[in-house]
Amino acid sequence: MARMPPPLAVASTALLLLLFVSVSPCRAASGGGPSAVLLPVSKDDATQQYVTMFRQRTPQAPVKAVLDLAGATLWVDCEAGYVSSSYARVPCGSKQCRLAKTNACATSCDGAPSPSCLNDTCGGFPENTVTHVSSSGNVITDVLSLPTTFRPAPGPLATAPAFLFTCGATFLTEGLAAGATGMVSLSRARFALPTQLAATFRFSRKFALCLPPAAAAGVVIFGDAPYVFQPGVDLSKSLIYTPLLVNPVSTAGVSTKGDKSTEYFVGLTGIKVNGRAVPLNTTLLAINKKGVGGTKLSTVSPYTVLETSIHKAVTDAFAAETSMIPRVPAVAPFKLCYDGSKVASTRVGPAVPTVELVFQSEATSWVVFGANSMVATKGGALCLGVVDGGVAPETSVVIGSHMMEDNLLEFDLVGSRLGFSSSLLFRQTTCNNFRLG
């Protein structure tokens, strides 16, 4: 008997499909392409992953995939039911293959030609960054279409006729949200979506990310669009910016010596709880010559992960500021939990002290309110949503996706900077209220 997905998974898939109902694909007009394209986002409650849907192939078909701020390219399962008349291989030694920097070439497939069985074809190494499993796969191109409006109704699709991606094996999808057949890379890599879409449609090399909580809608906005949210909240000119840093050592599962990381690192210099600085070993906040340390953002890490000494310092400081709230036994993976019935609610979540991520100056702080710092667990416990990452992690601080929910983040690849809004709830709106159309 077929296993039915949980109700929330069905709801999330239906929410994504709404963006593709009754939409006729149209290629961008010559010399006048779209100023922005979009990906709808929903949260898979079972896995805490963020999924999106786009159209690919000829004839076009909807593809569900997991969002990832890491990765080298979009990858999809080409073994199970990939049918298209418009795919084309990327030849070994071609300019595209050289730019992909894979140093691999497929030459030994004896079966009938298909996206997963090609010769003299550039080889890639798609990675499931949830399970940390990598494989080899062909690098090919095919039609890819994304919507150009989000609210009040989906608009026409903009089509990239030859979008480069990597074929993954079916086993690589294990551990992904139900129905997902690949991962969408939002990294700074040459053939990740931000750079490849900007080159295709000739708009700015930047994107904005607004992750939703469960049973709500979010969005990824590529290119040049105003960040307007109902009811008339325009965040385009009010973001706070901090530089994006480059880790000199690759953090990918498969890489070549000398490769730099394509993930998004930021220069965290301190953490405050309730306005008070937390004493930290600040050497851990810098990236050393071996690529160890520093702070990055991750959409596949559901909660913020802190090196052991940083985790202890933050949880100790938070406990000291919340001594009047009754504690309850810890609920894994968290260490600091409270009786949720004793915590009042506010517009921005549970009434608890703020956590501030301080970047290059005191004026550049990402203020985290209760909706993003606390996690409600089964049984009524309310826990500080940070996880102990061990004594020697590759990255000292990983800002997880729960901390990003209902916050607008702009990744400006040209200016090499991250813009952030802090909680949209404070402005009486949410990611679900983004409007473009």
Image: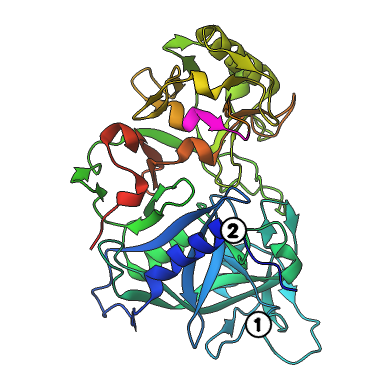
Furthest toward the left, the residue is 232
Percent position (x, y) of residue 115?
Answer: 65, 82
**Quarter containing the C terminus:** bottom left
Q: How is the model colour-coded?
A: rainbow
Q: Which residue is painted at 69% across and 31% down in the image?
A: 333
Element under disc 2: loop
- For this rendering, which residue is in front, 123 or 42? 42
Q: Which residue is painted at 55% across and 32% down in the image?
A: 375
Q: Quadrant of residue 288?
A: top right
Amino acid type, label 2: Ala
- For this rendering, which residue is in front, 276 or 2? 2
Element under disc 1: loop
Residue holding disc 1? 81
Residue holding disc 2? 72
In terms of sequence position, does the residue under pointer 2 or pointer 1 come before the other?
2
Percent position (x, y) of residue 296?
Answer: 55, 37
Q: Is residue 17 above or below residue 57?
A: above
In the displayed structure image, the side of residue 261 where residue 25 appears, left or right: left
Residues drawn in magenta: 372-378
Q: Is residue 83 above or below residue 288?
A: below
In the displayed structure image, the side of residue 22 where residue 53 appears, left or right: right
